[in-house]
Image (cartoon, helix red, strand yellow):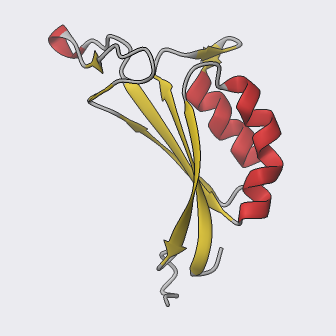
Amino acid sequence: MTPGLQRMLVIFVDETDMWGDGRLYAAIVSTLERHGIAGATVNAGLMGYGRHRRIHRKGLFGVSDDKPVTIMAVDAEEKLREVLPLIIPMVREGLILMQEAEVISTGTGQSV
């Protein structure tokens, strides 16, 4: 990936959401990697809520009561749109966004 305008796919799910025998967020990242998406990161949220208006947060002794997870992937819009037909059916409850992102540096010393 080169610096400049790209797109960022942002997916909000719950940490306990499953896909097959594993966690949904792991299945999504694996799908993105298999389809050559430049990079993806999963972040665990401390607190959040969605369309059901039920607040999710870290519970007693750090045990989750279904805390939110965000998956972010950055690449060219065309590449992200190609993988969306695989991702959309995986996210039964959650939110999927596509937004513009300016890549400033890729950690290679190359920058705008």
Q: State whether residue 104 is above or below residue 51.
A: below
Q: Residue furthest left?
A: 61
Residue at x 76% of width, y 42% of height: 84
Viewer can see residue 4: yes
Q: Quadrant of the N terminus?
A: bottom right
In the rendered view, does 76 fall on the left or right side of 9? right
Toward the viewer: 25 or 91?
A: 91
Is residue 109 found left or right of 82 in the rendered image?
Answer: left
Total numbered circles: 0
Q: Nearer the viewer, residue 73 or 52?
A: 52
Which residue is at 55% across, 33% downward? 95
Q: Residue at x 42, y 24 (%)?
A: 50
**Residue 35 visible in this rendered orientation of the protein:** no
Give the vertical position of 79 relative to 102 (above or below): above
Q: Position of residue 36 (x, y in %)?
A: 77, 55
Q: Residue at x 78, y 58 (%)?
A: 79
Q: Is residue 5 above or below residue 76?
A: below
Q: Whole-percent x and y of residue 75?
A: 66, 63
Residue 15: image location, x then y, percent: 45, 21
